[in-house]
């Protein structure tokens, strides 16, 4: 388990977790599961170690070679705010 230290946003201690990380690659959403990250319990900020960030960058660069473990449907909703 890695010690991520204190959250740089709110100062709370970060907790080691496995998260889902969404990446937009050429206009398509790719979700990477089981990403090791530090997660703040107070504000929700997430950080990854440098080697994990480099692995995510490699996924983006090698996007033509992506082999999806599975596919999911994601609803898209348009934001429409009424001005009072």
Image (cartoon, rainbow, N blue to C red):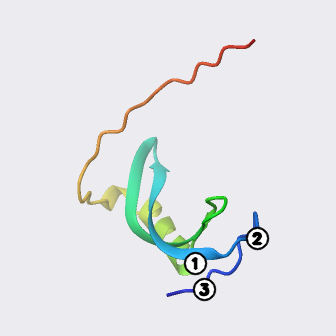
- Under circle 3, the secondary element is loop
- In this rendering, is residue 47 above or below 66? below
Residue corresponding to mark 3:
3
Per the model, the C-alpha gap separating discs 3 and 1 is 10 Å
Q: Comparing marks 3 and 1, which lies closer to the viewer?
A: 3
Foreground of the two, 56 or 74: 74
Q: Residue at x 39, y 61 (%)?
A: 32
Per the model, the C-alpha gap separating discs 2 and 1 is 18 Å
Density class for disc 1 (Cα within 10 Å; few <14, some 14-19, many ≥20) is: few
- In this rendering, is residue 62 above or below 13? above
Q: Comparing marks 2 and 1, which lies closer to the viewer?
A: 2
Residue corresponding to mark 2:
11
Density class for disc 3 (Cα within 10 Å; few <14, some 14-19, many ≥20) is: few
Residue 2 found in image quarter: bottom right
Q: Position of residue 66 (x, y in %)?
A: 31, 59
- Under circle 2, the secondary element is loop
- Under circle 1, the secondary element is loop
Foreground of the two, 74 or 60: 74
Q: Earlier in the sequence, mark 3 or mark 2?
A: 3
Residue 74 found in image quarter: top left
Residue corresponding to mark 1:
49
Q: Residue at x 45, y 50 (%)?
A: 25
Foreground of the two, 12 or 63: 12
Q: Which mark is residue 31?
A: none
Per the model, the C-alpha gap separating discs 3 and 2 is 14 Å
Q: Position of residue 50 (x, y in %)?
A: 59, 78
Q: Earlier in the sequence, mark 3 or mark 1?
A: 3
Density class for disc 2 (Cα within 10 Å; few <14, some 14-19, many ≥20) is: few
């Amino acid at each position: 388990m890695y010690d991520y230290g204190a959250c740089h946003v709110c100062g709370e201690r970060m907790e080691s977790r496995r998260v889902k990380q969404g990446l937009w690659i050429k206009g398509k959403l790719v979700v990477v599961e089981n990403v090791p990250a530090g997660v703040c319990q107070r504000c929700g900020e997430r950080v990854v170690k440098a080697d994990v960030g480099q692995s995510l960058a490699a996924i983006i660069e090698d996007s033509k070679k992506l082999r999806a473990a599975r596919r999911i449907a994601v609803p898209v909703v348009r934001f429409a705010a009424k001005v009072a």
